[in-house]
């Protein structure tokens, strides 16, 4: 018998029992078959077999870090949110950056929007800002979301990315042209997660102590400067180090170079929103800075790497439905769909008690309610306290002081196509003609031609007509790059969307 060496850390099984041998399976005879009674072998294999959880259906590849948010301007006239109540107030945050379409092992340098999700561990519970590095999105109706994502993923027949799927859907969804223009611009491939902005994209509601409310957007502006990769640079980076942005974030924090973002606020009163020239809740549009100047209200710094990727990053779960008093939803339809979908997907991916996982649980607030049980309940499950309300055993009480101020809703219930006088083509046109330099326009066109060139000609025509509608020079240059007949593109651009689709569908005129 070997003596127990008290100096060595004992290896145990999952129930704390010491393991005597972790290298040699229990066998019958010297080389004989393994015995089922080698419980250690069986348990070790069984746990390994279950190591993978479902990857996120979107935003599967990501990196995260811990840090803090600090208030730098008084915003109490707009919101009563406690974490924003005082200049200098700091709140712990956890941030996850990601790509969207690729699988968990995909390259960081893909042309794709980047997720930019911030969990604020506030004293009034966790508030999640689940944004992207772009101020707009491809679609504004949540019914279109699953279809949209399918087209950005793999063809069901051959499991390959498919330019026909990608561009067929986008050209049948012209409201996407603003986001498509950003995606194929220089900002479509951020050099690192540290060199990009984050945006709420949606409009949200803030309300103050007096119950007065405002519509707001937040912008997280990188203090490292915007840096991007060209398509050619990205090809090299993807081959050399598919995890380059994950590595960059980790290494910068290890070196003590803590990335930071200045947080800016845009605010509209309900009266301004009522009369605004654009639909203020349409996520395919921005609030131009000239109309609604952003003001700096805070700063976010990331200063601590996770010590365990699976526990802190893979199991982190954000939801745009995680509000705190002083912050609420806007009528943006896409946001309304997301309010349901995020909690739902986390229940599927992590289980009904995913809020108990340390990275997701409230750190600065006490969680106290009547919900009990469920798989993998990891806390004391409410102990011996009552599990129903109302009760007369001093259980936790709701308090109307935390209610969102009432707001009026009216209108007939119906499924209606989007209807707003201001066109989907104005803002992408402005981006192309007023914001981009000539060099940026050249790269935009070249990036589009390189990708759209893989789709069928009739789809190329339909999408190029949409670029033409945003700006005729934009459309002409894409047409030239794709060797399309500019006259035909102009003709298609002059049609209604219905006519354009009929002309370019399978077996149609084009
Ligand atoms: P401004 O001239 O005031 O702002 C233009 C903004 O465009 C810049 O501040 C910068 O945003 C952003 N930008 C610069 N290059 C690119 C690019 N390649 N891709 C995406 N965005 C870029 O103009 P407006 O506010 O009137 O907006 C004009 C257009 O700029 C919009 O239609 C929209 O496409 C784009 N834009 C507007 C934003 C807004 O919130 N108003 C935000 C981002 C883009 P940032 O300062 O955020 O870095």
Image (cartoon, helix red, strand yellow):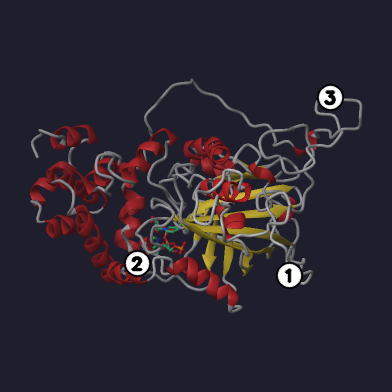
Q: CA distance from mark 2 to mark 3?
A: 58 Å
The residue singled out by tag 3 in the image is 390
Quarter location, residue 173: top left
User: In the image, which disc is placed on residue 238?
Assistant: 2
Q: What SS does tag 1 mark?
A: loop
> Is residue 256 found left or right of 1 in the rendered image?
left
Spot the residue most to the bottom.
255
Which residue is painted at 8% across and 49% down in the image?
Answer: 487
Which residue is painted at 71% across and 46% down in the image?
Answer: 208
Badge 2: residue crowd in 10 Å (few <14, some 14–19, many ≥20): some
Q: List x then y, in percent, for residue 461.
A: 15, 46
Q: Which callout, 2 or 1, points to the residue nearer the camera?
A: 1
Q: Nearer the viewer, residue 309 or 46?
A: 46
Q: CA distance from mark 1 to mark 3?
A: 54 Å
Q: Is residue 223 visible?
A: no
> Is residue 463 found left or right of 145 in the rendered image?
left
The residue singled out by tag 1 in the image is 8
Which residue is painted at 66% across and 54% down in the image?
Answer: 120
Q: In this picture, is 58 found above or below 227?
A: above
Q: How many marks?
A: 3
Viewport quadrant of the C terminus: top left
Who comes first in sequence, dot 2 or dot 3?
2
Q: List x then y, in percent, for residue 109.
A: 38, 64
Q: List x then y, in percent, for residue 470.
A: 27, 50
Q: Is residue 243 visible?
A: yes
Who comes first in sequence, dot 1 or dot 3?
1
Viewport quadrant of the N terminus: bottom right
């Amino acid at each position: 018998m070997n003596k127990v060496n008290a100096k060595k850390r004992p290896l145990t099984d999952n129930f704390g029992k010491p393991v005597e041998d972790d290298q040699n399976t229990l066998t019958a005879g010297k080389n004989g078959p393994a015995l089922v009674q080698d419980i250690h072998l069986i348990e070790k294999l069984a746990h390994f077999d279950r190591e993978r959880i479902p990857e996120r259906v979107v935003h599967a590849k990501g990196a995260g870090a811990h840090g803090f948010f600090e208030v730098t301007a008084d915003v109490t006239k707009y919101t009563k949110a406690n974490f924003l109540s005082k200049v200098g107030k700091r709140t712990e945050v956890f941030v996850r950056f990601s790509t969207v379409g690729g699988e968990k092992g995909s390259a960081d340098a893909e042309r794709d929007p980047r997720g930019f999700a911030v969990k604020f561990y506030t004293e009034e519970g966790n508030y999640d800002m689940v944004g992207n590095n772009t101020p707009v999105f491809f679609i504004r109706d949540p019914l279109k979301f699953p279809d949209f994502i399918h087209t950005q993923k793999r063809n069901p027949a051959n499991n390959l990315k498919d330019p026909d799927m990608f561009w067929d859907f986008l050209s049948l969804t012209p409201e996407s042209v603003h986001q498509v223009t950003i995606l194929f611009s220089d900002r479509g491939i951020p050099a690192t997660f540290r060199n990009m902005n984050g945006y709420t994209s949606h409009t949200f509601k803030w309300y103050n102590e007096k119950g007065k409310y405002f519509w707001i957007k937040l912008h997280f502006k990188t203090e490292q400067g915007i840096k991007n990769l060209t398509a050619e640079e990205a090809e090299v980076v993807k081959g050399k180090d598919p995890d380059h942005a994950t590595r960059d974030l980790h290494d910068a924090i290890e070196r003590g170079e803590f990335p930071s973002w200045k947080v800016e606020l845009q605010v509209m009163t309900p009266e301004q929103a009522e009369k605004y020239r654009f639909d203020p809740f349409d996520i395919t549009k921005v609030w131009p800075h000239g109309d609604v100047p952003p003001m700096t209200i805070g700063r976010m710094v990331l200063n601590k790497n996770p010590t365990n990727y699976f526990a802190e990053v893979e199991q982190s779960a954000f939801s745009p439905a995680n509000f705190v008093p002083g912050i609420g939803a806007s009528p943006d339809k896409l946001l309304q769909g997301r309010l349901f979908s995020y909690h739902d997907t986390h229940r599927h991916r992590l289980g009904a008690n995913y809020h108990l996982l340390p990275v997701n649980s409230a750190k600065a607030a006490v969680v106290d309610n009547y919900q009990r049980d469920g798989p993998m309940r990891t806390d004391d499950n409410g102990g011996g306290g009552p599990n129903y309300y109302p009760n007369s055993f001093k259980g936790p009480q709701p308090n109307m002081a935390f209610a969102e101020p009432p707001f009026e809703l009216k209108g007939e219930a119906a499924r209606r196509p989007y209807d707003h006088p201001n066109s989907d083509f104005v803002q992408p046109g402005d981006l192309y003609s007023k914001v981009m330099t000539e060099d940026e326009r050249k790269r935009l066109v070249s990036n589009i031609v390189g990708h759209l060139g893989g789709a069928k000609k009739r789809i190329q025509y339909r999408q190029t007509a949409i670029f033409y509608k945003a700006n005729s020079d934009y459309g002409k240059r894409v047409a030239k790059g794709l060797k399309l007949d500019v006259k035909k593109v102009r003709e298609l651009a002059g049609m209604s969307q219905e006519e354009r689709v009929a002309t370019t569908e399978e077996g149609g005129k084009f």
